[in-house]
Amino acid sequence: MSTGKSPALSYNVQHHQVRLELTRGAALDSPRPSPDLVQRAMAKLEKVQGEGKINFYEIYEERLAAVWKALRDAEGESDDLSVSFLFAAGAPTIDGLEISYFDENRRGLMVTTTGPMDLKKISIEWIRNTIAKVARQHGIFETLFQPHVQSALMRITAGDTLSKFIIESRAEMPKFQSTGKPYSVFANKNRVEVVAYIRELPSMQSDPAIDRMCELIGKAIDKIQSSGSPDMLLTKTDMASTIRSAISGPERVGLGMPLAVLAALPDLSKLIGKKFLSFVTSNDRMLASIADFDVSVYDDPEFDISREFMEKQMRLSDLRGQVTDQDLNAFIEAANKRENLDGKVAGRGKQPESGADPYIHLVFKDAPKQTNDQDFINIRESQQRSIVHAGQLVAEIRYAKPEVIGMDIFGKPIQPSPGPAMEVVCGEGIQQLQPGKFYAECGGVPSCEEGNKLNLTKSHVHEGDVNLKSGNIYFDGPVEIKGSVDCGALVRVKGPLKVYGSIVGGTVISKDPIEVVESIVTGTQGKVICSTHIKADFIENSNIECDGSIVVNKSLVSSEVVAGDYIQALAPDGVIGGGTIMCRDLVAAANIGFAKGAKTRFIVGVDHRVVRRTKIREKRLQNLLEAQERYKLEFRELAQKKEGQLTAKHKQLKESLKEKMASVRPIIEVATQQLELMKSSMTYNEDAMIAATNVFAANCQVEVGGQGVVMEADTMAVGISARKRRDSHLCTYDEIKSEIDKKLAGGAAPAAAAPVSDAPAELSADSVQPQSDISTSATEVSTESDQPQPDVPAAADTQKAS
């Protein structure tokens, strides 16, 4: 069953171009486009070619394949999303146009014209089609730098004669850093051109947004002109048209982004052409009329009245404006009679129009795509468009009939009067900081009711799975996920979290309790981190860190688990075994370890935060020692060379190694001291214990309260206590049952870590920066503060001598 309307082909008779409109629904119906689309376009253009109207035609099949795939991959977009693009084009032979290939480090074309083109007989689009054809002949398919193409076409339109005008490939586009801005402007002094790069098409669809960008373009123009370049012309109309049409083109699904648009080029009207007409303007600056007309110009062969001729003559007098059909026809009629043209209206300004039919547009649903430092699109970040953060623009008043900015005859914009007002009711969490713009006071889920009531809910219910389609979740409040957290997904919240499905390969981080109705299976790619409490049906093959307690209904197996309080399996046949289990206070289950299975390592009664910090310092010291040995080895190899064998580079390297060995030695000493101090700061909980109501497997490696305990055989209903009872750490379950019940009920004060704030300052990133080989130590340092570390009393701790 089709999920979208069929692809639609349309043919432009004047330009000999075939456009194709596709919907995402149609693309989802099939993994590849139908060959019928190519056949239909080919049949049409072959017919036109057979009639002698065109000399060649091209079918852009690679563009169709790219758009088709992009539509299918556009997760989160509706099936009604449509994209229109040029699919095929042809052109007749154009006399006086020469296009050649050049390859001077950058592939591109050179365009030459033998004289001004007669645009009454030649369509400017034919020239574009011919340029594209030559590019494809030389293997340049979708990579021509379009601002260069546009510059060439605008120069030809203005009557300029091109001589080896260079059109480069998209390699001309600069490498962007992530700036978070919707656009950037670059000035090219050599070409005397300004190019705008649009990153966020939705935010650039309004006149105010384009006007703000034009202000920046104006500064770029001033900068070029200040260096002695000729006067430049801002191509605002063509630029705005390109940006607005791109929202319905392949750029809508990310192809060809960022969009490069020609923003300014030399004012060709002042460099090209002969002035035939003079003008006077009306008092309101909205009309330009002919003055001081000399009838002798009728004898000049270049005097040929047309729309382009009138616009060019006005530009020569620094005038802009529109040439209407009525005014143009009056000119042509008078010129045919060789009449005096004084007083006839040549151009008119554009009257502004106020917007009408206001409505609330939910801007947060148009969230721009985010990029990393390499300018790659992070799909998981960009797909999440249901949650807002404090200070984010939630909604704004727009008009179904957009306002139109006017323009006087000199090209100066005229702002329209404000459109009709709209009453908006701001609920909790929404504030109006600017007229017609509404922002979030805190993180939450916005909604609009009855067309004008904005609200912000401080709890979030996510329907379905958290995956690539839905995007990651960041929320400062309670969250419910009515599905699972899939592989690669990230959920970071600051309130209670309930997952009705499972956590499968995803990463979940929460300060408040996490409840998973089904299972947690993070594998090696994911992790679950919590500051308070984790509860799940079962946990398997996972990486878990919790500063509080961990409770499973059935089992916790084959996992790397760290808990700051206790770990418990509730089922009568529950199992805790496999992997490494680290806990501060208590591990309790029906079955501990596997009698005939994988071994389990229990480390109970230690401060997991001190253990983690100790591992970080051990890794840091190891990196430093390895770096020191590497420096010694490299220095020894250089020292064995004779003086005549040492180049200037060798000598420089030798001195550098001396400095590195001298600087790394004291760093190693400090790192060793810090490691020993951290080890000595370890405290042990004398009330820690492990208990099994059914079977305690003998193949478990057990350390309780800093003491190693060996089980000689599988034992029923037994516990291991850090405090000896009758000269043994082993005891029956009944002996410690009351203490276990008290711990699980929260009666016992949680054990705490020994204070470590008196330790010497840690190695900072600055202290190891000169030695690039050991920069990983600085990375390790930062991981300590990433984990939640609640303050707890140390009353139940005892200091163990090191």
Image (cartoon, helix red, strand yellow):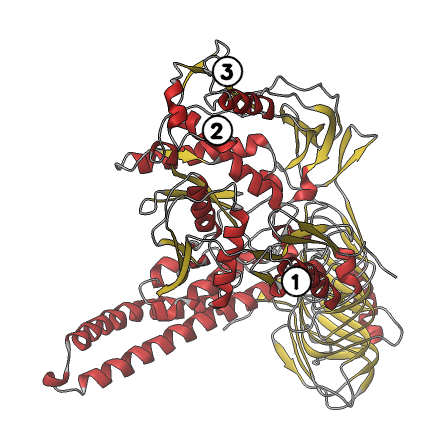
**Residue 460 horizontal/vertical position (percent):** 77, 46
Q: Is residue 112 above or below residue 335?
A: below
Residue density around tag 1, few if under 14, some if 14–19, many if 20 or more, within 10 Å: some
Task: Judge whether 330 appears above or below 199 on screen.
Answer: above
Tell me if label 2 and label 1 are in contact, CB under 8 Å: no
Q: Which residue matches tag 2?
A: 305
Marker disc for residue 344: 3
The residue lying furthest to the top in this view is: 283
> Does residue 746 appear anywhere in the picture?
no
Residue at numbered disc 1: 46
Q: CA gap, disc 2 to disc 1?
A: 36 Å
Label 3: element kind: loop
Earlier sequence position, callout 3 versus callout 1: 1
**Three-letter code, disc 2:** Ile
Looking at the picture, how far across and down is residue 691, in whole percent?
Answer: 78, 74
> Left of 511 or right of it: where is 146?
left
